Structures are given as structure tokens and as C-alpha cells.
């Protein structure tokens, strides 16, 4: 017996980043690591000296800045890789290839992060390796895809789990190399920090000790994305978090508008603080980009509502939508997707058969239950709020794709669509042999031809129906198939347990299997082919 296997209908999106100019640092193939680092520092010092000497110099271009920054990153090769990793406590390695677009996007950010870490006095060595030029070295480091980021701690690697902006790289690297929290003790330090960070967690502690502080520290070490800051000075704290309520113990999250300051009101436990961050670290409505897609999809809030629209249409909704988002905060994540961005919008639209839509579309995904939903009324703040309420109460029905109902008159093989699956298959009093196919399936054509022959052979047998369904355009909760083509035989007296027929059988063998199952029900049968 064949038991349909559940399969998620959701696509996990990889980051499809824009192609930028590939930056390649000079090869350091034959030098000792200590000499490499010393030479790099001399070059940087020379740059700094030139900058200090000349008021006549022109402002450096962005390309010059990137070129200077990249000289801080050590280029690994056949000769220096082992010494670099074995000779340093912390090494963050970027594995790349010159032709990979995502590598090209990440490399200047990696170099910028290296510059920032050097200025902060970090002991972390930032290095990169061209996996196309040095494939054996890359393989020895277990670099298999591009780009790959690995942190080596005393020679042992661990995967990178942070974001991909320069700031996020710096935050993650400092947390993993023993600096999970920045302590601020003066107005000048606070001002300097605010110039560099727009999102952070700040804690006020009378003393940097005790159980509350221990939980704060634990949360800072466990989090991989957000910079944690601490101070014992209330005036300094107020500069970082203006909506401060005078007390000896306070924790808040600072992020971008429209909800810049959020106070933590839970108990001081690491788990509570981390949950608070998960619930609040994104804006009320997040604009989906290729850079933040991984963070959005990995968010612990598994119920997401997406508004897929033109930016001008979204602008009309954004202000009232903020009020709607506040009502469902921590329960639903709201996301805007620019309908013009095919890489981001089209996969979602395809799931609903709305690839050609030019009007705003509101959909929802529950990643916990693998169900999706569609707002089928006009897109207004009121309709979106009602839609969200229905999602939480369970009164909104899941959405399943379906083609229009076809005319099956005089057809030897019936065309089944999502809307007619119950009527023609599950509720039918006849035996039904259903062919499940997709247009892109290479071997489906062979089964289709066999179905034509079988339908002709069994023509006139009233208790047997031949049918087919295009699984790329039609869905049904009781039709969960992940292999194509698939042949399911639904017997009249047991529609809940369809029999899986082998698709690699000959037409004669399939006819014999049909007869065998019909005989078991004492039905009239014909001779085999």
C-alpha cells in the first residue's frame, strides 16, 4: 500500500547577490606568515603616513579605500595556509572564486570588516583563499561552496553563522573571539559608538556582577547578530537610549525607525532576552532583500505575512500597516517584497499560480505547519488586519493552487484540477487510476502514452476511470507527492489508501496490475493485453 508522504511546499531561498567587481589581493605565495603580516602592516603604515602628510592629496575614492582595506586581508596559498591557521589563535577564512557573484559581493565587506577589527585591536587574522587557484588547499579546509566563511580557533574550524554586512561580520567575529559586550564609560565613547552602530542591545547595571548581569552576558555570548553594550552610568545610558526610565537596572533594544527604542520588560534570563530579540530585532515591516533573506527565513517567528507589490503601492499602505503590525507583534512577521524583483518575488507568486500578477498580493506562510494562505479580497489595511486575525484564530482556510475547471466531456482520460480532486477522485464511486505529472518531468511523456493505451484497452468498463493531474499547477491537501511521474490507483472501496503502481513497468504489466486489483473487488475484467 502507498502512503502519501508529506512534503513542504516551501522554497528555501539561497542569497542571489548582485555581481560586483571582483577584488583580488596580491599573491603572497612564497613568504613566511610573519613576514606577510609585517609587510601588510608596513603598507598600511605608509598609507597612513601619506594621508597625514599631505593636505594636497585628493579625497580617496571608494575603490582606493577598498584596495587599502583589502591589504589587511591575508591571501592564503599552498605555502602559507597551514602556518597561518596553526600560528594564530583565531583565523576567519573566506573561501571564494573569482567568477562567483556572491563572493564578489562579500569580499569588499570582508575587507571593510578586517579594517574595523584592526582598528579595534582584535587579534583575529582575516584571510581569504581563491579555491579555483588553490583547490587542494581549499578542500583541506573543507571549503565546498562559495562563498564559505569558516572561523578557525586554535586550528579547529566552525561555520560562520552571522550576517553579511561589514558591521555584522565585525559583531560576530568579536563575539566569537572573546568580546561579546562593549563597555562604554564616557560621553565620547557613546558618541563614537552611535556613529558606527544603528542596532544594538544596551544594559544598565549598577555593578557588572550578580545573577542578572550573568544572564545578560550569557545572552550576549549566545546571540550571533546584535551588538551588546553595557554601562553603569545613567547619563551615558540615556544618550544611548533616550527613552530611559530612571532605575538601577534596565535593558533595551535600539533599532531603526519607526520603532527605535524598545524596553525589555521580562525577567533577566538569557532565554528571555534572546526571545525578546527574536520578537523585536526586525522592523515592524521588514523589506526583503537578497542580503537579509537568510535572516528573515531563519527567524523563529514561523508565521509570516508578505505584501508583494510595487513600491508606490506599498507606500500607500506602509503607515496604516505599521499600526496593524503593532497589534500582531511577536505573533506575525510582516514583510514587503518588491514585485519587480524577480529573484525575490517570483518564487512566492509561483507558489500561488500568480506569476503574471501586477496588482498587490498578500500571502502568508506558516513554516511550522507547511501551509500557505492567500488574501483573496482587496488589499487594504482593514482586509490585511482581518486576514491576520483569521490566521491566528484558524478561520482562514489554507490555499491550494488549482487550474480552472476543465470540460471533460467525451474525454477518455479526465483532467483533474485542485478544485475537482475531491469530486472526481476521492468522492467518486468508481476505481480511479490517476497519473500525476509535471511539464518539466523527463519521463512523464512515456507514462502518458501508456495511459492512453490503457484507457483505450479498458474502454467501456464503467467502474474504472483514467485521470491525470498537473502537479505543478494544482494542489490538494490529500495529494502529497514528491516524485514524478506517479501512478496512484484509488480503489472504489478504499480511497484513503491509494496503491502505488510502478512507473517503470510495461503497458502489459500495468494492465495486469489493474486487473489484479479489480479482481480482488470481484469486478468484471478484461483479458490482459
Image: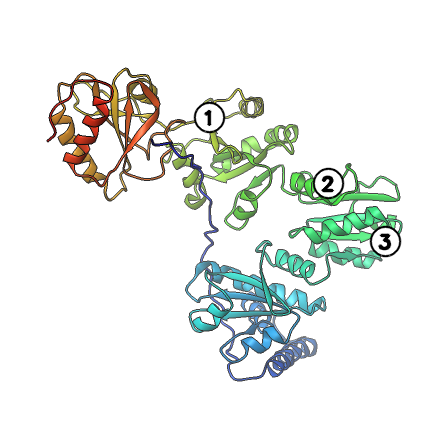
Q: Is residue 516 visible?
A: yes
Q: Residues within 10 Å of mark 3 (few under 14, many from 20)?
A: some
From the viewer's perspective, tell me whether residue 226 is left or right of residue 109. right
Residue that label 3 marks: 208
Q: How far apart in space, not on screen, are marks 3 and 1 (Cα)? A: 50 Å
Distance of label 2 from label 3 (alpha carbons): 19 Å
Which sits in the foreground, 414 or 228? 414
Q: Nearer the viewer, residue 398 or 188?
A: 398
Residue 130 shows up from this direction: no
Please state the horizontal and vertical placement of residue 527, each as a whole percent of the image: 11, 26
Q: Nearer the viewer, residue 445 or 64?
A: 445
Precedes in sequence: disc 2 or disc 3 = 3
- Which residue in the structure is indicated by mark 2? 272
- Which type of secondary structure does the marked residue at label 1 adopt? loop
Quadrant that contains the N terminus: top left
Rendered view: 338 above or below 468? below
Whether residue 44 is situated above or below residue 351 in the rendered picture: below
Q: Would you place residue 153 above or below residue 456 in this image?
A: below
The residue drawn where x is 37% and y is 36% is 355
Q: Earlier in the sequence, mark 3 or mark 1?
A: 3
Task: Identify the secondary structure beneath mark 3.
Answer: loop
Does 409 appear above or below 64? above
**Marker disc for residue 398:** 1
Left or right: 190 as drawn, with respect to 336: right
x then y, percent, for residue 409: 18, 18
Question: How would you rate the neighbour count of disc 1 (Cα within 10 Å): few for under 14, some for 14-19, many for 20 or more?
Answer: some
Amino acid at each position: 500500500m502507498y502512503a502519501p508522504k508529506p512534503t513542504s511546499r516551501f522554497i528555501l531561498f539561497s542569497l542571489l547577490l548582485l555581481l560586483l567587481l571582483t577584488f583580488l589581493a596580491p599573491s603572497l605565495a612564497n613568504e613566511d606568515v610573519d613576514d606577510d603580516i609585517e609587510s601588510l602592516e608596513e603598507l598600511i603604515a605608509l598609507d597612513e603616513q601619506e594621508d597625514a602628510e599631505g593636505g594636497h592629496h585628493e579625497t580617496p575614492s571608494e575603490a582606493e579605500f577598498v584596495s587599502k582595506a583589502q591589504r589587511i586581508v591575508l591571501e592564503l596559498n599552498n605555502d602559507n595556509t597551514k602556518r597561518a591557521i596553526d600560528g594564530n589563535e583565531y583565523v576567519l577564512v573566506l573561501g571564494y572564486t573569482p567568477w562567483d557573484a556572491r563572493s564578489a559581493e562579500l569580499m569588499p565587506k570582508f575587507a571593510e570588516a578586517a579594517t574595523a577589527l584592526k582598528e579595534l585591536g582584535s587579534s583575529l587574522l582575516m584571510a581569504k583563499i581563491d579555491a579555483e587557484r588553490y583547490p587542494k588547499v581549499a578542500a583541506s579546509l573543507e571549503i565546498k561552496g562559495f562563498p564559505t566563511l569558516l572561523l578557525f580557533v586554535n586550528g579547529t574550524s566552525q561555520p560562520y553563522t552571522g550576517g553579511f554586512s561589514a558591521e555584522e561580520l565585525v559583531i560576530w567575529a568579536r563575539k566569537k573571539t572573546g568580546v561579546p559586550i562593549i563597555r562604554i564609560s564616557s560621553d565620547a565613547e557613546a558618541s563614537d559608538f552611535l556613529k558606527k552602530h544603528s542596532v544594538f542591545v544596551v544594559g544598565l547595571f549598577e555593578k557588572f556582577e550578580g545573577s542578572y548581569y550573568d544572564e545578560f552576558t550569557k545572552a550576549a555570548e549566545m546571540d550571533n547578530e546584535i551588538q551588546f553594550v553595557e554601562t553603569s552610568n545613567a547619563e551615558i545610558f540615556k544618550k544611548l537610549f533616550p527613552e530611559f526610565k530612571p532605575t538601577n537596572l534596565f535593558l533595551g533594544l535600539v533599532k531603526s525607525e519607526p520603532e527605535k527604542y524598545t524596553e525589555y520588560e521580562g525577567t533577566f534570563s538569557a532565554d528571555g532576552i534572546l526571545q525578546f530579540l527574536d520578537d523585536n530585532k526586525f522592523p515592524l515591516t521588514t523589506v526583503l532583500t537578497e542580503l537579509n533573506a537568510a535572516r528573515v527565513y531563519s527567524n523563529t517567528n514561523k508565521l509570516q505575512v508578505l505584501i508583494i507589490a510595487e513600491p508606490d503601492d506599498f507606500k500607500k499602505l506602509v503607515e496604516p500597516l505599521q499600526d496593524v503590525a503593532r497589534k500582531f507583534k511577536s505573533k506575525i512577521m510582516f514583510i514587503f517584497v518588491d514585485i519587480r524583483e524577480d529573484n525575490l518575488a517570483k518564487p512566492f507568486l509561483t507558489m500561488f499560480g500568480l506569476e503574471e500578477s501586477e496588482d498587490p498580493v498578500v500571502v502568508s506562510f506558516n513554516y511550522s505547519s507547511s501551509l500557505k494562505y492567500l488574501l483573496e479580497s482587496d488589499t487594504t489595511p482593514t482586509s490585511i488586519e482581518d486576514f491576520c486575525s483569521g490566521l491566528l484564530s484558524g478561520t482562514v482556510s489554507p490555499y491550494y493552487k488549482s487550474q480552472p475547471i476543465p470540460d471533460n466531456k467525451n474525454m477518455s482520460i479526465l483532467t483533474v484540477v485542485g478544485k475537482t480532486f475531491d469530486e472526481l477522485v476521492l468522492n467518486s464511486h468508481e476505481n480511479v487510476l490517476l497519473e500525476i505529472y509535471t511539464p518539466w518531468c523527463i519521463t512523464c511523456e512515456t507514462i502518458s502514452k501508456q495511459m492512453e493505451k490503457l484507457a483505450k484497452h479498458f474502454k467501456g468498463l464503467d467502474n474504472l476511470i483514467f485521470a491525470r493531474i498537473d502537479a505543478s499547477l494544482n494542489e490538494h491537501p490529500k495529494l502529497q507527492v514528491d516524485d514524478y511521474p506517479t501512478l496512484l490507483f484509488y480503489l472504489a472501496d478504499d480511497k484513503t489508501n491509494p496503491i502505488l503502481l510502478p512507473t517503470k513497468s510495461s503497458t502489459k504489466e500495468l494492465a495486469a496490475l489493474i486487473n489484479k486489483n479489480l479482481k480482488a473487488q470481484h469486478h468484471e475484467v478484461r483479458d490482459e493485453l
